[in-house]
Image: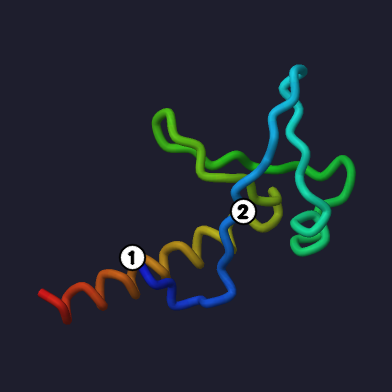
Amino acid sequence: MHKCKDLSMKMWWSLKVWPKWQVVIPKEIRDLIGIKPWDTLVALTKGDTWFGFVKNEDFFAMMEYMKDEIAWMEDSLQHII
């Protein structure tokens, strides 16, 4: 099991897709990341796998976070090997 260095990271498991392809983002998530009506979200995918959404204006900050997390994981793995 991977331990994230950022313990505030959470995973959300239930976003339901409705018949008209709409997805309801739970209020707790909307409040947490400040999503408002008409905000633009970026969908993160690789191949046919979907990873999530991020607010358009937060995209580059999220990429920096991921880069730092990957560097931390690589450093942690070197101590194991």
Would residue 53 appear left or right of 72 to someone viewing this image?
A: right
In three-dimensional space, the C-alpha distance between marks 2 and 1, rounded to whole angstroms, equals 17 Å
Within-10-Å neighbours for mark 1: few <14, some 14–19, many 20+ = few
Nearest to the observer: residue 57 or residue 33 = 33
Please determine whether, in this image, residue 14 is positioned above or below residue 76: above
Q: Position of residue 45 (x, y in %)?
A: 49, 38
Q: Please, what is the three-letter code of the amino acid marked with disc 2?
A: Trp
Where residue 74 sits, quadrant-wise, is bottom left
Q: Which residue is outermost to the right?
A: 37
Where residue 80 is drawn, which disc sits there? none
Count every numbered label the image shows and give the total.
2
Residue found at x 77% / y 64% = 32
The circle on residue 12 is 2
| Picture quadrant of residue 8 | bottom right
Farthest bottom residue?
79
Residue type highlighted by circle 1: Met
Q: Secondary structure at mark 1?
A: loop
Q: Are marks 2 and 1 in contact (CB under 8 Å)?
A: no
In this orientation, which residue lies closer to the viewer: 23 or 41?
A: 23
As drawn, the residue found furthest toward the top would be 20
Left or right: residue 47 versus residue 10 is: left
Residue that appears at 74% across and 18% down: 19
Image point (83%, 61%), residue name? 31
Q: Which residue is mark 1?
A: 1
**Location of residue 14 in the rendering, given as x and y in whole percent from the top left corner:** 65, 44
Position of residue 15 measured from the top left corner of the image (x, y, whole percent): 68, 41
Ranked by sequence position, the earlier of labels 2 and 1 is 1
